[in-house]
Each structure stands twice: as C-alpha cells, then as structure tokens.
Amino acid sequence: MKRYIKSITDTTELEPIFSMSKVGLDSKENMLYYVNPDINRVGEPYFKVYDSISHKKATHIARISFLEPRYILHKDETDKQPWKLSSSEKKKMLNYLNKSSGFFKMTFFQYAMYLWNNEYGFFDDKSLEEYENPMIAYAKGFYDIEENIHHPSYLPSYLEIPDYTKL
C-alpha cells in the first residue's frame, strides 16, 4: 500500500482514510453514505450523505443525526457545500437506509450505526465468545452495556430510524 501512496504526487483529490467507513452507495439515486466519527468530539452521532456515488466527484454533503431528523452543522470539507435534501431526496435516502442488505443481514441504517460505533472504538476491548463476528454481536445487543449506553456518542442496537422526511 505504501508503494502506491508514495507514487502519488497530488493527494488533494484522495479520499481521507482515517476513521471513515463507507456505509454504501445507491447508484440508482446517485447518493453515497459514510460515517466518520471524531473521537475528540462527544455526542451528536451522525452520518454523511454525498450527492454522488464518488466522494471525489461529490459537490454537496449533508450531515444527518442518527438520533433525530436534524442536520448537524460542522466545518465543511474542502469544496463540498452543505446540502439540504429536497423531499424526494429525503424519501430516496429513507428507502436506502431501510433497505436490508443480504450480505450484512441488517438494514443499511443498522449497518451505519454499527460502523459508527466500531470507528468510535466502542467494540475494541470486548471479547466475542458466543458470536461469530462483531456485527452479529452488535445486532443482538451484545455491546449495549451500561458503560456504552450512557456514553453520548454510542448508538444502541435497538435505536429506530427517525422520520427523516421531517428534516
């Protein structure tokens, strides 16, 4: 991997790789979904929606709370403008987030919550004795322990998707 990075002279077009997980992309609706928690920022867990299936080509970004239908105001990425979704875009987003992934055996909203918690570091020091992987353990509530539940950045496995049509 280092060999490829060393050969790149202009890194401004590269996607940041630190603590950023792609939830997925909706090629039909041309939308891309990411989580990117900052462990120095407590509370306000959110996901990102881009107006393209390519992070590089996206011109707009919406940061949306996992907890309620609300935009999160944050310092904008270079050359990405804040995005207020239209009513049809909100419906498209809801359709995608509610869609079940056969691969992950959960909705994309649940998968986004899992990725947020994983990137934040809530799963790092927990032993998985009876589960085959952390994703299944999360879905079954294994990580919903008191220490995590009371942390303002943790997303419990039982969290329901908000009505994002009210954004």
Image: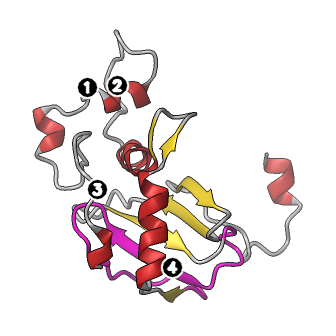
Residue displayed at 40% across by 51% down: 109
Question: Is residue 67 located in the magenta-colored stretch of the structure?
Answer: yes
Residue position marked by numbered label 4 in the rendering: 61
Label 3 residue SS: loop
The crowd level at tag 1 (other Cα within 10 Å; few <14, some 14-19, many 20+) is: some
Residue 28 versus residue 12 in the image, above or below: above
Residue position marked by numbered label 3 in the rendering: 161
Quarter of the image with the C terminus in it: bottom left
Label 2 residue SS: helix
Say which of marks 3 and 2 sits in front: 3
Residue 120 versus residue 76 in the image, above or below: above
**93 vs 66, nearest the viewer:** 93
Measure how far apart labels 3 and 4 are at the Cα level: 20 Å
Q: Assess whether mark 2 and mark 1 are in contact (beta carbons under 8 angstroms).
A: yes
**153 vs 161, nearest the viewer:** 161
Reading the chain from its start, which is encountered first: label 2 or label 4? 4
Residue position marked by numbered label 1 in the rendering: 142
Measure how far apart labels 1 and 3 are at the Cα level: 20 Å
Give the magenta part as a residue range.
53-80
Q: Is residue 35 visible?
A: no
Residue displayed at 55% across by 84% down: 60
Measure how far apart labels 3 and 2 are at the Cα level: 19 Å
Report the magenta stretch's main SS: loop
Question: Where is residue 4 shown, x and y percent of the image?
Answer: 85, 53
Residue position marked by numbered label 2 in the rendering: 137
